[in-house]
Image (cartoon, helix red, strand yellow):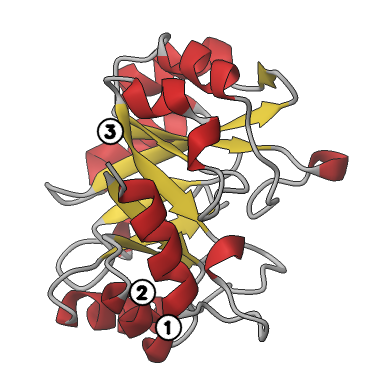
Amino acid sequence: MLVKICGATSAAEVRGVADAGADLIGLWHGVPGGRADLSAHRLTELAAEARATGRLEAVLVTFAADAEALARLTGPGGPAWIQLHGYQPPGTVRALRARVPDGVRIVKVLHVDGGSCVEARLIGAYERAGTDCFLLDAVGAGGRVGSTAVSLDDGTVTGLADRMHRPFLLAGGLDAGNRDRFPGTLAHPRFLGIDVDSAARGGDGLLAAGNAAAVTRAWRAP
């Protein structure tokens, strides 16, 4: 099971996430008003910090849709994953796939509002465009997307997963105590791992190695 911890803004947070046993570190860029939004230069610095741990791979998390600009941020000097966390169309995925270096993985977030997925009818189109995997996340109050801390229903998750031919990550209010709420998700053959933000943070709002480790241990338990 892959564990992704999202929203690092400092080298200390990156190293703490690596010490916690996670596999992926989410770095925000092109998230207007986001508390963890990074400049392109800072994104590159923290991606290098992730590589230096010998464990973590960096994930560029973005609401942006400029495929050419995003592709320039990836590759040997940048993140090895791009997570499109917004309502970018399949055409953006197709344009990215044509531009990113070999080995860069493209993740498309699917947004679930209540029991329905906004992009459900586009799953096949995203796959044909070159999506490597999906990430399922909940829409918050007022249509907010990203870091909503709202949990999804296990049956909704597995129902969407059954429509896919690609692996998926689960996000949305995951913590060290709610793994048992997702038996169908954990057993699904396309389940790839989890994406955590709020539950990995300490009282100061920063990513805390101890909290990230608690989530990682709980979800990787037999």
- The residue lying at 42 percent from left, 17 percent from top is 161
Which residue is tagged 2?
17
Is 75 drawn above or below residue 77 in the view shown? above
Q: Which is nearer the eye, 162 or 78?
A: 162
Q: Are marks 3 and 1 in contact (CB under 8 Å)?
A: no
Residue 13 image label: 1
Secondary structure of residue under mark 3: loop
* Residue at point 29%, 28% (across, down): 130
Residue ranking furthest to the front: 222
Q: Is residue 141 left or right of residue 3?
A: right
Badge 1: residue crowd in 10 Å (few <14, some 14–19, many ≥20): many
Q: Position of residue 110 (x, y in %)?
A: 54, 30
Q: Classify residue 45 by image quadrant.
A: bottom left
Contact between labelled residues 2 and 1, with CB atoms less than 8 Å apart? yes
Residue kind at label 3, given as amino acid type: Asp
CA–CA distance between discs 3 and 2? 24 Å
Q: CA distance from mark 3 to mark 1?
A: 27 Å
Vertical order, 110 against 189 (above or below): below
Percent of width and height locating residue 29: 51, 66
30 relative to 140 in the view: left or right: left
Task: Count residues near mark 2 (Cα–Cα under 10 Å), then give few for <14, some for 14-19, many for 20+.
Answer: many
Amino acid type, residue under disc 2 in the picture:
Val
Residue under label 3: 132
